[in-house]
Image (cartoon, rainbow, N blue to C red):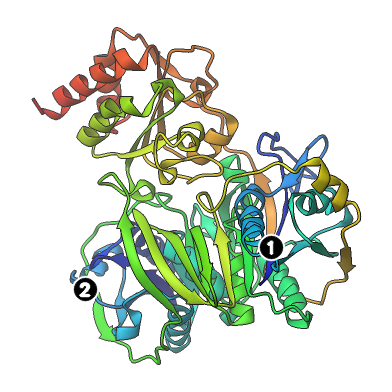
Amino acid sequence: MSVLIFIDHIDGHIKKASLEAASYGAKIAEQTGDTAEALVLGNVNEDLTTLGRHGIKKVHQVQHDNLKQIDAQVYTKVIEQVAQQTGAKIIVFSNNSTGKAIAPRLAVRLKAGLVAGAVALPDTTNGFVIRKNVFSGKAFAYMAITSEIKIISLNLNAFTIVEKEGVAELSQFNAVVDVPTIKVTGSTKTTGKVALTEADVVVSAGRGLKGPENWKMVEELADILGAALACSRPVADAHWRPHNEHVGQTGIAIAPNLYIAIGISGAIQHLAGVNRSKVIVVVNKDAEAPFFKAADYGIVGDAFEIVPKMIEAVKKVKGIS
Amino acid sequence: MRILVCISKTPDTTAKIAFTDNNTKFAEAGVQWIINPYDEWYALVRAIELKEADTSTIIHLINVGAADGEPIIRKALALGGDEAIRINTIPTDPYLAASQIAEIVRQSAEKYDIIFTGKETIDYNNGSLGGMLAEILDRPYVALATHFQIAGNIATVKREIEGGEETIEVSLPIVVSCQKGMAEARIPNMRGIMAARTKPLKVVEPVAVESLTKVVEFGLPPVKAGVKLVSPDQVDELIRLLHEEARMI
């Protein structure tokens, strides 16, 4: 039997979230005494045998013209074929945009229970129980999957990528691949060099910045930290920043290692989207801002004075002049 | 055009999250209930906009839940739904909820060209219902949509992908999960509220479907140790802490 891990890629490169999923799935396989096998649909520029470094023993690749764009219906049927042939009892996705489109469909086809947004390894001592975030990160739930086949979508940044020695065996899988029913007619990259949901460090700013013209210093800080940019809901609603930078309960939920919030008061709805960050730094001139209660480090002060100083200090630490 | 909007009842975004019965149940006492924001602000309002552009459009609302969800269904009708259906069972699992809704769609004389859902509910954060529904009904599914336009039988949809957006074209019928960008939140007007009182709200009994997952226990995240405040004159010290203590820079 196998634990099958779906490997997602973009522009020919495997996504970081999928390396987390691979490491997580391999760990489950160790736990259950199964083999960790990965599945790649389409072509990637990277050497797939290197997935062995994350604990994968075997990689199944399906190459087909119909897989050039992600059509969840088409992908689901291909994954079903691989899952059946490899006898997969546990299937792992990253809970990213691709996983969110495919995992629920596959769950129906395989009549498999799905836990979307897992944040820890399953407990198999009494059934199959997985911890996931609920109430937008304000609580968690232990979910039992009661079906024979189990599907887990792992939250981004919830499991550390494992790096060790290992080479995976690569094998081509011949699958029946349907013609897509959707047509991708264009794509746009959002501003910023780092994808928000995949970023290790996120620099976020709110109404305290007073206007969109003041974002330059925030961008500079993000730039030298290699961070993604985010903002609070009022900022996106006022069109100071694009809506895809809005993090919070009704925007994007993120879990970076470091979240720096500048001029954001920290309303409960904002916290719900960022409270899974490992370390939170808050800069706000209002000492009573609720965000300080959720922060690890804070400075009570004016963003317009503090941020330029932060930029200088980071440059010093990083040795950038 | 026939549109079905799936709406779910969730605690208000500011509700205090606590649990009872040995941490197996959400503590509902004193909680204010709302339409799941993604269902209301984006799915329902976009449907209403489509109806405003083409007045022959019909919007039906569907909710899986107990009778205590009827106030939020009435609110959705006040915003602009034409009719509502409530499937009288507790949605313990997205597979169960999707199976119930799919059964209604199959049985219905309406063919529902478009089924809108929110991208996820703010209580369970699964985001699985739309995909499951699409698979049961064998329809295309576009998750995490930020824009939606329709021309004849073809929908043009923008969806979120990692680090960007993708524009896709797809033929109806479809299922779409909606998020920020689709529409702007509205509040119901008095005329809508009055009209909603007499709009049809049909209650149907569920079909037998088993859940594939269940909650064993809830828990609350550990409380933070407390913020370490650094003086505004010592920004260097903050960065040093992040570098040496937290090892984040």
Residue A203: percent from the left, percent from the top? 34, 33
Which one is in front, A14 or A179? A179
For the point 14% across and 22% down, the residue is A316
Q: Is residue A229 left or right of residue A97?
A: left
Q: Are circles 2 and 1 on residues that touch, CB within 8 Å?
A: no
How far apart are the alpha carbons under marks 2 and 1?
A: 45 Å
- Quadrant containing the C terminus of chain B is top left
Which one is in front, B53 or A117? B53
Q: Look at the numbered disc 2 and give the secondary structure of its residue.
A: helix
Q: Amino acid at mark 2?
A: Thr
Q: Residues within 10 Å of mark 2 (few under 14, many from 20)?
A: some
Q: Is residue B15 left or right of residue B69?
A: left
Q: Look at the numbered disc 1 and give the secondary structure of its residue.
A: strand
Residue B90: percent from the left, percent from the top? 80, 61
For the point 58% across and 35% down, the residue is A269
Q: Report which residue position mark 1 lands on.
A: B5
Q: Is residue B154 left or right of residue A22?
A: right
Q: Is residue B184 left or right of residue A59?
A: right
Does A317 appear above or below B48?
A: above
The disc numbered 1 marks a residue on which chain? B
Give the numbered dot on residue A49: 2
For the point 30% across and 81% down, the residue is A61
